[in-house]
Image: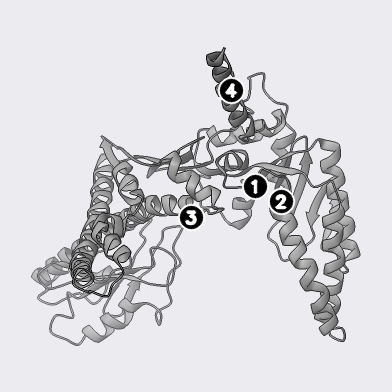
Amino acid sequence: MNSRLLAAAVLAAVALSCSSRYHPQSVSTEAAGLFARADQAGAGGSLVLDFEVMRELGFLNPEQNGDANAAVDMLLYALPGIAAEGKDEAFGQLAARAAVLVALMRDWAVWPRAQRFGLFVAGSAAQPDMQAIMDNALMVLAVKGDLSANSELLKGLAAMDRAGGQPQLKLESGDLCLAKDELPAQVCIKAGNGYFALGTAQSLKGIAAPASGAALPTAAGPMAKLKLDMPGMGKGELLIDGHSSLTVSAVVNTADPKMAEQLEKMANEGLKALDESREKTRKVMGPALEQTKQALASDAEAPQVMKAAASRLTLDTLLDPKGEYAALRQSLKVARNGAEVKGELTVPESQLKRFTQGGSMMTAVAVSGIAAAVAIPNFMKYQCRSKQAEAKANLKSAWVAQKAFFQEKDRYGESFEEIGFQPEMGNRYTYCMRGQCLPCSHPSCTPPNPMENPCFTMTMTQAASDNGGVFICAAADLDDKGSYDVWTINDLGQPSNRTNGCR
């Protein structure tokens, strides 16, 4: 009988622990149809965040409005005081009106529960302008609310906007639109059964299309999913997934196996640098630890409890008391198979619970940060460095053309036209010689004016020197941040990177 009671107690404890754990809720079929865009083939990208999985793992409060209520309470304490202090100023009146609207938000019981967020951007073969980018972008929020409740919410938001003075929103055919003339396109929010969608009129058109007969997955998926498809470069996917432990995985399929090889090399170099940095820390802290332990051991007045604690302290327990860094580092792996590069990192359940129960997002931030710090910058640097190949090749061609002209005419050419050099269309760099410049022609580049172009000044200065005839320069703003990548070629035909724009 006792054994039966014990078994029943164990089963009851298991059932209680299972029932107390949050179970992710499914999204509506209509919302699932919109999120299926994340798996569609073609150029572009997508980002999906599943709030239901975040609640299951403890990153978000399972209560519907727990976090929001705290923020609302803080505002309602602060705004009336601000309004009173500035009662004779415009900002005081604005604060008073804002306090009323915030109170309405607190007491209005139709706010839906957010379940999933998605951002989808379709690619375009042509160089897109801002209008094209917006027309190919769609933002979706899956919520726990039907069409009627969600439409009512949009009506309420429009009424609150009107009550706040100087309304910026208007309802058009049930959609809530931002009335701003300075925007390149009108942006609207569409309410649906279990979702809200934000986009331009063009990007919202496809939402009303009838769903296919295929069954759509409505259950929770990965906590976060990022996909990119860049024609000519390759495809990439980043997943953050888990229901107990947390796994961060990344896969990059490159268009060129050499690019994958370089990515693997740079990732391993990043890991090596991480390990070397850790080892430097150990070498610095090791002697400090031993000196402190010896000093305490020989100190007759030091408390015995303190001496005992010092004797037990090791370098590992000092730097990584719970073994968390070691576990993360051991799980971090990078592998390559042909043109595919994979990376993975796992946070064990015990460590994940310790952070989430403390109300901290630091584990997810640290994990994503390590993966991003190793993979993303190296991937972007490789893309940038691959563009530098154009400058080296074209500088070499121009140098050969100038040398051939000298052999024939016994003087250096005064212009690119004279020596017969012209880069192929689509060049990212601007090429200069003796103050004459051939501008870039790639759709993504903006030709710099002469005073901003470092090559223009350099070639004007070198024109009067002995090697001015073969001094040719190339410059490009590869990341569109205003910092130029600058190359020159010397009289021996050796390209040199004067200013590295790929750091």
- In front: 323, or 154? 323
Q: Residues within 10 Å of mark 4 (few under 14, many from 20)?
A: few
Residue located beneath label 3 in the image: 362
The disc, 4 or 1, on the residue closer to the chain's N-terminal end is 4
Does 141 sit left or right of 412 as displayed? right
The kind of residue on which mark 3 rests is Met
- Real-space Cα separation, disc 3 to disc 1, in angstroms: 16 Å
Give the Cα distance between marks 3 and 4: 37 Å
3 or 4: tag closer to the N-terminus: 4
Along the polypeptide, which appears first: circle 3 or circle 1?
A: 1
Colour pattern: one colour
Q: Tell me: residue 9, above or below residue 156.
A: above
The tag on residue 370 is none
**Disc 1 on helix, strand or loop?**
loop
What's the CA distance linking mark 4 and mark 1? 29 Å
**CB atoms of marks 3 and 1 within 8 Å:** no
Q: What secondary structure is found at the residue carrying circle 3?
A: helix
Front residue of this view, candidates 144 and 40: 144
Circle 2 sits on which residue?
Answer: 66
Percent of width and height locating residue 53:
58, 38
The structure residue drawn at horizontal position 58% and vertical position 23%, both measured from the top left corner, is 9
Amino acid identity at mark 4: Ala
Q: Which mark is residue 9?
A: 4
Using the numbered discs, state the Cα–Cα distance from disc 2 to disc 1 in whole angstroms. 6 Å
Secondary-structure class at tag 4: helix
Number of disc labels = 4
